[in-house]
Image (cartoon, grey):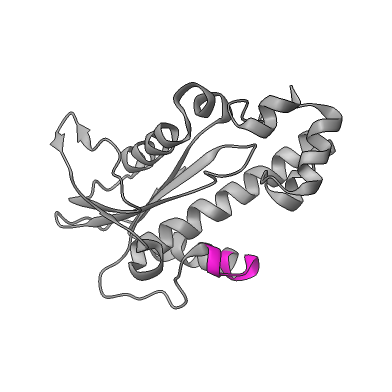
Amino acid sequence: MSQSSSYERQDAVAGVDEAGRGPLAGPVVAAAVILQPGTAITGLDDSKKLSAGCRNALAEDIRRQAVAWSVAWSDAAEIDALNILHATMLAMRRAIIGLPVQPHAVQVDGNRLPNLTFTEGTMAGEAIVGGDGCVPAISAASIIAKTTRDQIMVTLDGLFPAYGFARHKGYGTDAHRTNLQKHGPCVHHRRSFAPVRLAL
């Protein structure tokens, strides 16, 4: 998913972040956001520090005000095939590719960069530990990634109600582990993760 305004500039920098590396089920979701220079969105922060209501409100502001935004993911099958780190990097790369405005560079939360070599050449990139709390574009990306993933898990809850995905979003809570042992994994569980593998 992506959206853009008509604005474009050669020195645009996209913030990139992910949500969902730790859960036992569901995709890992990445977002890339280019913010309008000189226009601050009040309240941007690491999505994990915000309430669900605040995240959802900010996500609407970001989608409305950003120069461009894009969301992509790697599903459970890709996570199992590649491992969670490589699947995360793939989701980030997809989010960058999905931007309708090509950035000059990207800033990524964490200590690793995805593959930034494209047909046009290699894009500049910077990995920033804790960037989701101090770089507005990365904060925006973390909010878009988190709210998108939460909505995906609510949708999966309607399809697989036995696991309680809407409540725990796929994380390994006691209730989730109990239901996993009782019902076995569904197609959206990450079989390469030990608690799921043990439940098979």
Query: What is the magenta segment's predominant secondary structure?
Result: helix
Which residue is located at x 63 percent, y 25 percent? 191
Q: Nearer the viewer, residue 188 or 56?
A: 188
Instruction: Name which quarter of the figure residue 9 lies in.
Output: bottom left
Position of 53 with respect to 78 (left or right) is right
Residue 39 visible to the viewer: yes
Residue under the point 52% across and 43% down? 21
Residue drawn at (71%, 26%) of the image: 198
Where is residue 43 drawn, in percent x and y? Answer: 47, 76
Counting labels gives: 0
Q: Is residue 170 magenta?
A: no
Q: Name the side, left or right, on which 33 lies relative to 21.
A: left
Q: Is residue 48 left or right of residue 133?
A: right
Point out residue 111 in the picture as x, y percentages from the top left corner. Answer: 31, 50
Report the front residue among 132 and 150. Answer: 132
Residue 36, horizontal then vertical, whole percent: 30, 66
Q: Viewed as shown, does residue 92 lie left or right of 8?
A: right
What residue is at 17 percent from the left and 50 percent from the top? 104
Residue 186 visible in image: no
Q: Quadrant of the C terminus?
A: top right
Please state which of residues 143 and 199 is positioned toward the viewer in this rendering. Answer: 199
Seen in the picture, residue 16 relative to 159 is either above or below; the reply is below
Name above or below for residue 5 compared with residue 197: below
Span colored in magenta: 48-55
| x, y percent for residue 171 | 66, 46
- Is residue 40 placed above or below 137 in the rendered structure? below
Along the line of sight, the residue nearer the viewer: 120 or 52 = 52
Quarter-of-image position of residue 85 = top left
